[in-house]
Amino acid sequence: MTTEALFRLLPDDLLDRCRDRAPLADAENVFFAADLVELRAAGYLAAPVPVSLGGSGFDLATLVRAQRRLAAAAPATAFGVNMHLVWVQVARFMHERGDHRLDWVLRDAVAGEVFAFGISEAGNEAVLMDSQSTARSCGDGDGYLVSGTKIFTTLSPVWTRLGVHARVERGEAGAGGRAGGSSGDADRETEPQLVFGFVRREGAEVRDPDEASRGLAEGVISHLGTWNPLGMRATQSYTTELHGVRIAEADVAARMAPFDGSDPLILAIFSAFSILTASVYAGIGDRALELATSAANRVTIGADGQESLRLDDPDIAARLTSAVLEHRASLDTLEVMARDVDELRVRDDWFLALAAARNRVTDEARGAVEVAMRIVGARAFDADSELARLYRDVLAGLFHPSSSRALAKTVRGFLGAP
């Protein structure tokens, strides 16, 4: 994919407008509605969709660069759009490997539908491998009714398709449908399963949280508490409580046993989420080091009245040099992961490598922002400064799976430790 195509979907003037709107969206804690309108009109929501299906055909490596570019301008916008792009990339991942069960996701993305990520649950350290939400077969045999609470549901005001997973207890497995995995095995129909699928909310538009159920075929959605976080405020990532919400049989993506990661959907989700989420934080690091470099090249007047660059200070030069080198290494890690996905590489350490890359990139981005704060100085400490906003936004990286604690467990398992 060429750089020309990337700049066509994300031209400088569009990014400038996103950057100009970001401070107000953060200060007023409002959704990035205007940014989304522009990005959708530009075709960015369908960027990963193959050209043959009406998209721009961005491979994952190009999408990573695009998300870095958007995040450098407006981190919350990039993160919000990211959760939509995760599902589109999941569908592309499977399509490229000859699995067409989510081709409809690619077509819906081209049609302008907005996908949101409804997987995270408070206290569920198993993440994709199990769920605290429950699903029961519909009486009419058409899918499942899902109940449970999902957290950090980014794009809450506007999604039209919410990807979720839920646990189906013994005897409730339901019809085989078109889902992958072991759904056709009659002997396992009575065993607990996880179901992955999509809730449809037709005609959704930016709305008040109290109207979250509008457009549902069945059931109720409510948002608990208020969205008033330290950073990433414009994402409006409400806690979402589902009450008997339908996943139609046609929208079931997979059924599988809990803790069975053999269905390709699991690697598709884990790789898309890990790499694209890391790309947002890499973009924050890009911008932080840009601001740090600009500050380091400012002329200062010393106590002796002599002019010099701040970069001439050995401490500043050392900090900036170290930060740039660390950033370069983390970007290379991200590029390798994206390239391996694009090249359909088979590797036995996928989950370890992806978790390690996600943690490395987000940790390094926080370090880059801190270095920038030190170099820019007191001006960065103003609450309404761009760097102060980046400082708050980058902290959200602490809360995404896989956490550093989960990564340590993964390493122990990979090494064969008990």
Image (cartoon, grey):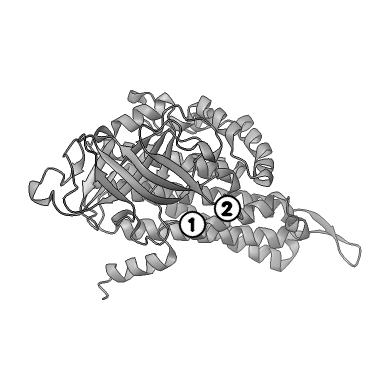
Residue that appears at 26% across and 38% down: 252
Residue pushed farthest bottom?
A: 418
Q: Taking the image as drawn, is residue 341 in sight?
A: yes
Crowdedness of circle 1 by 10 Å Cα count: few (<14), some, many (20+)? many
User: Quarter of the image holding residue 414?
Assistant: bottom left
Front residue (pair 52, 22): 22
Q: Is residue 326 above or below residue 38?
A: below
Q: Image point 35% across, 47% down: which residue?
A: 147
Q: Which residue is mark 1?
A: 361
Give the residue pinned by disc 2: 285
Q: Position of residue 127 (x, y in %)?
A: 35, 56
Instruction: Report x, y in % for residue 212.
Output: 48, 38
Element assignment for label 2: helix
Pick whichever, 292 or 351, lies toward us: 351
Seen in the picture, residue 108 relative to 391 is either above or below; the reply is above
Q: Residue at the right extreme?
A: 305
